[in-house]
Image: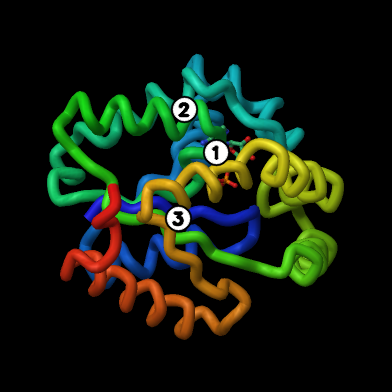
Amino acid sequence: MRLILLGPPGAGKGTQAKRLMERDGIPQLSTGDMLRAAVKAETPIGLKAKDIMARGDLVPDDVVVRIVEDRITEPDCGNGFILDGFPRTVAQAEALETMLAAHGLELDAVVELKVDEEALAARVENRARESGEAVRDDDTVEALKHRMSVYRAQTAPLIDHYAHTGKLVAVDGMQEIDAVSAQIEGILGKVRNGAVGAAG
Ligand code: AMP
């Protein structure tokens, strides 16, 4: 099962990816987590990404594409993976298609977590204000607003991009976490039965 979770910051992609990983044993590939690990370890990629991430901007496409390509070829990804936070631009989506084709692989589904952006912004702003210390460098109100506008400008066009493939399925991300998980599991069931993705 090769899956993309798509949605704005704070939509619950990470939470849902972790649940899928626990329930279905499919590894979660979060480019945000991988980049944060690189920043912490002060690797060359981390040093390059640190300030960009703190501002809430996107790390250059070539950097994240290389990270993902290295990761999906590891043995634990043999039965599939859940991409959480990648692709974030149309160029990344195209690079993903090329790399999957090069490895003889195909995407099964793209799950869009649909959310009310205003309600979401309020939720994440509260989290940023209430936490005594910053949980993440980019979890400030300003950075979050910027990440939202980056999402709208650079990542939201992926919804159209994937709508054309017949693999895009929308889920109401404003429901309770369990309800969102149940809906995603239902989609995966359909994917396994071949009812999603037939057009691609
Ligand atoms: P996330 O944890 O997915 O919200 O990612 C945190 C930050 O890492 C983002 O705001 C970006 O700066 C960077 N990042 C993560 N994934 C990507 C990606 N696919 N392309 C570019 N930058 C990314």
Q: Residue 88 carries which label?
A: 1
- Whichever of labels 3 and 1 marks the residue nearer the N terminus, that label is 3
Element type at marker 1? loop
The answer to whether the beta carbon of the residue marked 2 is less than 8 Å from any atom of ligand 1 is: yes
The residue where tag 2 is placed is 64
The residue where tag 3 is placed is 5
Would residue 77 be found to the left or right of residue 82 on screen? left
Element type at marker 2? helix
> Residue at left 16%, top 70%?
193
> Residue at left 26%, top 36%?
72
Give amino acid for label 2: Val
> Residue at left 68%, top 54%?
135
Give 94 or 140, whichever is nearer the viewer: 94
Q: Can residue 189 be seen in this view?
A: yes
The answer to whether the beta carbon of the residue marked 1 is less than 8 Å from any atom of ligand 1 is: yes
Kindly indicate whether the residue at mark 1 contacts the one at mark 2 (C-beta within 8 angstroms).
Answer: yes
Q: x and y percent of residue 69 in the render? A: 31, 28
Kindly indicate whether the residue at mark 2 contacts the one at mark 3 (C-beta within 8 angstroms).
Answer: no
Give amino acid for label 3: Leu
* Number of the front mark, 3 or 2: 3
